[in-house]
Amino acid sequence: MSKPPGGSTPTGALETSLIDRHRASRARLIEFGGWLMPVHYPSGIIGEHHAVRRAAGLFDLSHMGELEVRGPEAGIGLDHALVTEPSALKIGRAHYSMICAPDGGILDDLIVYRLAEEEFLVVPNASNAGLVAATIVERLRDFDAEMDDASRRTGLIAVQGPEAERILTGVSDLDAPTLRYYSIREAVVAGRRALIARTGYTGEDGFEIFLAAPDAPAVWDRLLDAGRPLGLIPAGLGARDTLRLEAGMPLYGNELDTATNPFEARLGRVVKLEKEADFVGRESLERVARAGPERLLSGLIVRGRGIARHGYPVHLDGAADPVGRVTSGTASPTLGVPIAMAYLPVRASEPGTMAEVGIRDARIAAEVVPLPFYTRPA
């Protein structure tokens, strides 16, 4: 029997309702965002990465936050709280968003789903879920809307990869081919009621399944049984990280933080400066939009031997002082070369610019390249 959702370890880390499944599968577990999560299974990070690119991977994302916002002014209240315009979403659609501080710094990036005329689902990162929940409550204070934090009672399972649609079709009543990207719909999966969204964080097609936490183990088992003949395997946080990095997707705490604004992260398109509602951070972000950012998130391919890791310095023109630091880096399993992201001065962010990354005691040549590194075949 699985433990009740929201249980914790002696160190205080929370456990998802799938923890027994991870232990039975001999996953390596680590504390992440306040939760005990699988970083990889016996297949290993590279094996799980390739499975997602070639077939499918099954992820436990139950550590993510789920914040339900309801009320007659839920939409315009979220317009005030976030940089996007949730009130403009059609029912059953979603968009990528951010919640910013008054100075324009990013408190978190998140996805907003519109479930009904007066009901929204906001999904923040696990490590920021408490902060985002408290901030949204504060920012909704003058609106006829309320927020319910459903994080502890919600399970979230993702099926990602080119076989995801076939797998989900076999275990649910969802007409999966008709569900558009960044859309969400009610369905029954393995006999359990759920919300299924066509979203993900891997650069592949895929689905995210929101359901009652106690129902997650049965759905996990059914998905594995149905997907195994098609190449589906469980995948952990390690593969999720290498997959999102290849796809050029930012990770909060690496590419995004309170010292970074959306325009620096090349996500200025998310900020709806033209919307009618005033929103927190608007004045600061308008200034950045007018003046332009001083640095930009950039892709790097290391052209020498070595892997550029988080925090490694990036140098230009042989200068002693670094012009930036690597935010994320790995040896790309798909491309077969070391890749990284780093914030660089605008003048150095043009593709083809040559830089050097300080790796141990050496400076290794690296070339600035466009993001993303990988785009799935059409």
Image (cartoon, rainbow, N blue to C red):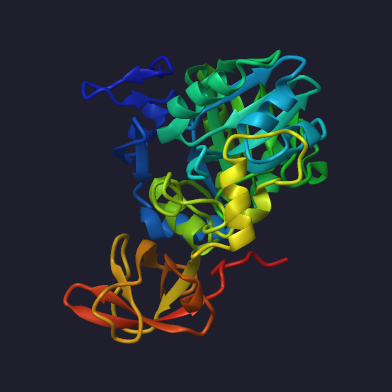
Figure quadrant of residue 327: bottom left
Q: Quadrant of residue 85?
A: top right
Above or below: residue 340 compared with residue 229: below
Q: Nearer the viewer, residue 12 or 41?
A: 12
Instruction: Identify the image quadrant of the N terminus.
Output: top left
> Which one is in front, 213 or 1?
213
- Up the image or down, 149 lies above or below 365; here it is above
- Whether residue 41 is visible to the viewer of this picture, yes or no, is yes
| Residue occupying the point 42% across, 26% down | 16
Q: Residue at x 74, y 30 (%)?
A: 114
Left of 202 or right of it: where is 273?
right
Q: Is residue 204 visible?
A: no
When asked about the image quadrant of residue 351, the answer is bottom right
Q: Position of residue 17 (x, y in %)?
A: 44, 23
x 54%, y 20%: residue = 138
Residue 288, given in percent of the width and then of the height, sits at 57, 55
What residue appears at the point 55 percent right and 34 percent down from the top-left corner? 157
Pick the front one: 272 or 48: 272
Count of numbered circles in the view: 0
x%, y% of residue 290? 64, 59
**Quadrant where the image shows the C terminus:** bottom right
- Whether residue 48 sits left or right of residue 37 in the image: it is right
Q: Residue 171: x, y in percent?
A: 68, 34
Vertically, is 183 above or below 361?
Answer: above
